[in-house]
Amino acid sequence: MIRRFFWLFYDHLGSVIALNLLWSALNIPYALIAYTIAKISLPMGPWVALGGMVIAVQVALFSPPSLVLYWAGASWVRRREISLREMWSRLKGQYGRAQLLQLILLFASSALLLNAAFYRDFSGLFGLFLSALMAWVLIALLLVSLYVVPVLVTQDTNVGNTLRQSALLAVTHLGHSLLQGIVFCLFLAVGALSGIGLFCGVFAAWGLWFSVYLRGVLIEYTGERWEDEEHRSLRDIIRPWES
């Protein structure tokens, strides 16, 4: 998977950066809402701040404009070229469903966070157990969230089916889903440490990475095959004229 992602990223490096900039522009309203949520929650104690950051990340990074990144990633993984007209058509056609899915996930996450905070105030082990249970359910929900927009892009189905398929993939591939959650955090860390990286390529790179992973998972159900991969090495980067 790493090799396949690397060469796809290398072949579409310029497009990855351009798409990330386009996504950043389309995502400005969601980024502003996320910033406001984070700014309000940070001074209100560690637990409120943590909950606020979870919601802020969901608002900013699981937003409808991310459709363009996952659609481009899904197309590149299948060796299809992309066009702005087709991208715009896909964004318009799926925007409403993506927005509804995001609102459902935000509502569920908020409810779990409030329940965890409520049970934490209970005395004894029972309150601690219920609070921890809510936290684990929240983690499971966040793993499902990773699949929602990519599944909507590739399957183009309704909201209910998208949620069911995302939950099924997250549960049946739990270990890989946890790993993808860790990789997602690493991409975010790289974007944060690099300053403008999140806006100039990192999130589009994540979209391509997850598209490669999801294609491999879906092949188990669809019976499709990977396209023949070119045999390339680092020499094709260092000395491309010899390839």
Image (tube, rainbow, N blue to C red):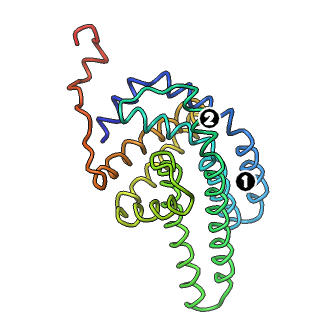
Q: Quadrant of the C terminus?
A: top left
Q: Name the residue rendered at 69%, 60% in the picture.
A: 52
Left or right: 63 in relation to 235:
right
The location of residue 240, given as percent across then percent down, is: 29, 12
Left or right: 150 in relation to 118:
left
Q: Amino acid at mark 1?
A: Ala
Between marks 2 and 1, how big is the CA–CA gap?
21 Å
Q: Tag 2: Cα neighbours inside 10 Å, few (<14), some, or many (≥20)?
A: many
Q: Residue furthest top?
A: 241
Q: Amino acid at mark 2?
A: Trp
Q: Name the residue rendered at 61%, 51% in the picture.
A: 98
Please name the residue that numbered disc 2 is placed on.
23
Which is in the foreground here, disc 2 or disc 1?
2
Q: Secondary structure at mark 1?
A: helix
Please name the residue that numbered disc 1 is placed on.
38
Residue closer to the observer: 94 or 102: 94
Q: Name the residue rendered at 57%, 32% in the picture.
A: 20
Q: Is residue 235 above or below residue 134?
A: above
The location of residue 182, given as percent across then percent down, is: 44, 53
